[in-house]
Image (cartoon, rainbow, N blue to C red):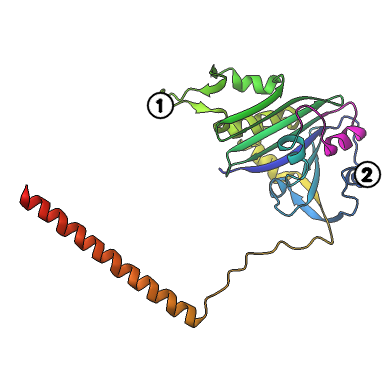
Amino acid sequence: MGWKTSMVLIENRYGFNDETALLKALGKANYEFDKEVLFEECLYPNDESINIGYHNNTLIICDDYQITQHAIELSDGLNLSPPETALVSIFPHAEILSVSCHSVSNFHGYALIRRGLKTRLKMAVDGECIAHGEPFQEELEIYKNSYEEDGIRYWKDENYPDEPFTEDAYMEDFTFGVAKRLLGVNLDTVEGFELMQHVKFKKYKDPNAKPKELPNFAMRTLEEEEKHNKRTKWLKYLLYALLFLAIAYAKSCLRNS
């Protein structure tokens, strides 16, 4: 399955549920409630929404990469990004775990905050990996089956021992193995699928957001289409002529050999 996922998981031992205050802290005070959606629907909403749900004493924000991009991809090492700083102001003693992945670019990454300090940041994409801080338990469970060579982690493939995997190939293992730390469930399992079918989220959106513009595919006029067809026809004839000359030359070479 090609996963595209972005979420922030916040340890919620004291039952925080002031979503208005949360949106305000994140600079989304103008966002308004839109509708209820299932967990699976907001993992990758692609609508610049903020989706908030609760499970396993964890507050879950599916953010459409709005928070996680700053927490992971644009992060200055282990320094807190502005959205993370805002979350720490509300949850100063909680664990805050940002997780994201995108199968198209073979990307996955995560950042862990403990009691206001970012203790771990890692991202992997197309064979390269950037990491700060010490790995935590859920990571170590995956790393224990790897080996290191020239500073790069590899995992052996039993069927092709001479073609080991690099870290980015373990996108789902890391993304959902790490998220299980607070969710209590690996989403890339049958149990996780059932969870995504039942947990409901509240979707908040900017009521004044402009709809995304679709590409403008302009159609050719009849005159332009006629010119295009003529060019295509002559190019086709030219290719045929070149092919004929190549065949004739090859036959000549064979006769003379």
The answer to whether 231 appears left or right of 144 in the picture is: left
Residue 163 image offset from top left, x and y in percent: 43, 27
Range of magenta residues: 76-95
The answer to whether 45 appears left or right of 145 in the picture is: right
Residue 87 image offset from top left, x and y in percent: 87, 36
User: Which residue lies most toward the bottom here?
Assistant: 222
Residue 156 image offset from top left, x and y in percent: 48, 22
Q: The N terminus lies in which quarter of the figure?
A: top right
Indicate whether 220 appears above or below 107. below
The answer to whether 119 appears left or right of 15 in the picture is: left
Q: Which class describes the residues within 10 Å of circle 2: few (<14), some (14-19), or many (20+)? A: few
Q: Residue 99 got which mark?
A: none
Indicate whether 199 appears above or below 183. below
Looking at the image, which is closer to me, 12 or 71? Answer: 71
Residue 58 image offset from top left, x and y in percent: 81, 34
Q: Residue at x 20, y 63 (%)?
A: 244
Mark before the other along the chain sequence, 1 or 2? 2
Q: Residue 21 got which mark?
A: 2
Looking at the image, which is closer to me, 80 or 235? Answer: 235
According to the picture, the residue beneath numbered tag 1 turns out to be: 160
Q: Quadrant of residue 67?
A: top right
SS category of the residue bearing label 2: helix
